[in-house]
Image: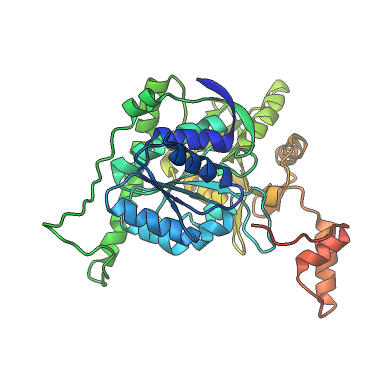
């Protein structure tokens, strides 16, 4: 049934239809509407046979999910930004224990300085934690990915995070085709945990493992991620057959067939990129888009095949590894190693900065004209003059306070107070 609905409410509806038995959550912008809605649904009985745990922190939320999942319950939580960092220790525990927890990450920048707007630095910081990472382009895809995430998590006994852009999607009202309970029940079987607690066969969970077996445990975590490369597209195919629409999978190709220049990206920015590509196509420029839905595990073979005919690849990403370069860009370079293709790393949209059609068009014009160096990391719409003023101020000696406050004064903005 199609409905005009806020992204957070749509996700809460989708999670409800998946019948979780335990929801443990701590509110943090911009995921708060999701867990508030789930709390209401538990209170009113719409989400029956579910225990809602009001915990004291994000670490507590994930710890409670670990306990509940270990006991055989279908579990769910959601977080964002600093909250995801607070969960970090428990995230590794969840994946190391092979627990099929599903979590929404409402992507938001990591401080300092504090910033509540969208980029992908939070989820990207946890990219090697052993969680499968799926990225939604739209609220429709966010709904669909949550339904698929439970089936994926429980088929492999591995945790899955569904990433959706904070505010850009979580607080946007869109037409969303919400599935019925009957459809979800037919697609998602009742949870039968692969790990069980049996009083007749007691075990210690989370016991210390020494050098004699630790590498093997980590290898099995990796093996499950690799198995997901087959499972994710298979589940997406089943979803298309059951619901009549394509959603999920590893990658999304847009006007890619004869594209000589391909833009690689993930999340909601894909819609804007596709509009720019349409305009360039109207001018006879062979440009396409490769959207990454599954970032972990990284589908290296599929990316290599999709980009095999390109001569230029422009990676637009909302996070980067400080002191190293692009994250998705480096993964893309790994996938295209040995191919005659130049890969350009472009960081865009940090801290919620708009990624406009005009800026993307200027970027692609520069790439096509050979004005961008593929060996350098590029920042879209970076105010170099502002940066240079602060660097010069630093060279002059001691200064009161950090860089952020100085630059805010330069542009005439007063720093706001802390807000979580």
Identify the residue at image location x=56%, y=33%: 139
Identify the residue at image location x=64%, y=27%: 286
x and y percentages locating residue 96 in the rendered image: 33, 58
Give above or below for 351 relative to 169. Answer: below
x and y percentages locating residue 179 in the rendered image: 45, 25
Give above or below for 298 relative to 2. Answer: below
Quadrant containing the C terminus is bottom right
Residue closest to the eye, 177 or 157: 177
Identify the residue at image location x=60%, y=30%: 288
Q: Which residue is most to the left?
A: 200
Picture quadrant where residue 384 is located: bottom right
Residue closest to the eye, 64 or 114: 64
Picture quadrant where residue 411 is located: bottom right
Quick check: 255 left or right of 44? right
Q: Is residue 267 visible?
A: yes
Q: Which residue is most to the front?
A: 44
Quick check: 307 left or right of 155? right
x and y percentages locating residue 75 in the rendered image: 37, 46
Q: Is residue 306 visible?
A: no
Q: How many marks?
A: 0
* Colour mapping: rainbow
Residue closest to the eye, 221 or 365: 221
Residue closest to the eye, 44 or 271: 44
Q: Which residue is most to the bottom?
A: 398
């Amino acid at each position: 049934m199609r409905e005009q609905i806020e992204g957070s409410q749509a996700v809460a509806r989708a999670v409800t239809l998946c019948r979780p038995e335990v929801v443990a959550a701590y509110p943090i912008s911009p995921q708060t509407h999701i867990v508030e809605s789930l709390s209401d649904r538990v209170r009113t009985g719409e989400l029956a046979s579910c225990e809602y745990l009001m915990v004291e922190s994000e670490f507590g939320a994930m710890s409670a999910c670990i306990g509940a999942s270990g006991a055989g319950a279908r579990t769910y939580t959601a977080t964002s930004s600093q909250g995801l960092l607070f969960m970090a220790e428990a995230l590794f525990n969840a994946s190391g224990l092979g627990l099929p927890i599903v979590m929404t990450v409402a992507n938001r920048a990591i401080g300092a300085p504090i910033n509540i707007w969208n980029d992908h630095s939070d989820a990207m910081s946890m990219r090697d934690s052993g969680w499968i990472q799926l990225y939604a382009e739209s609220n429709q895809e966010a709904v669909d990915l949550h339904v698929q995430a439970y089936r994926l998590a429980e088929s492999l006994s591995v945790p899955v995070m569904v990433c959706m852009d904070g505010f850009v999607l979580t607080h946007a009202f869109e037409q969303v085709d919400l599935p019925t309970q009957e459809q979800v029940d037919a697609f998602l079987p009742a949870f039968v945990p692969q790990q069980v607690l049996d009083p007749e066969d007691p075990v210690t969970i989370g016991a210390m493992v020494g050098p004699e077996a630790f590498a093997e445990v980590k290898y099995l975590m990796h093996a499950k991620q690799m198995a997901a490369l087959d499972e994710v597209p298979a589940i997406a195919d089943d979803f298309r057959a059951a619901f009549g629409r394509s959603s999920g999978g590893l990658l999304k190709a847009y006007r890619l067939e004869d594209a000589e220049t391909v833009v690689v990206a993930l999340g909601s920015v894909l819609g804007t990129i596709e509009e720019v590509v349409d305009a360039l196509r109207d001018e006879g420029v062979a440009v396409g888009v490769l959207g990454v839905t599954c970032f972990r595990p990284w589908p290296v073979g599929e990316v290599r095949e999709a980009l095999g005919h390109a001569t230029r690849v422009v990676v637009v990403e909302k996070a980067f590894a400080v002191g190293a370069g692009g994250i998705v860009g480096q993964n893309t370079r790994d996938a295209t190693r040995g191919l005659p293709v130049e890969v350009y790393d472009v960081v865009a949209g940090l801290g919620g900065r708009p990624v406009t059609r005009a800026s993307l068009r200027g970027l692609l014009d520069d790439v096509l004209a050979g004005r961008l160096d593929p060996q350098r990391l590029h920042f879209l719409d970076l105010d170099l003059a502002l940066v240079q003023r602060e660097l010069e101020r630093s060279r002059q000696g001691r200064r009161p306070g950090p860089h952020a406050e100085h630059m805010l004064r330069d542009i005439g903005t007063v720093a706001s107070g802390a807000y979580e």
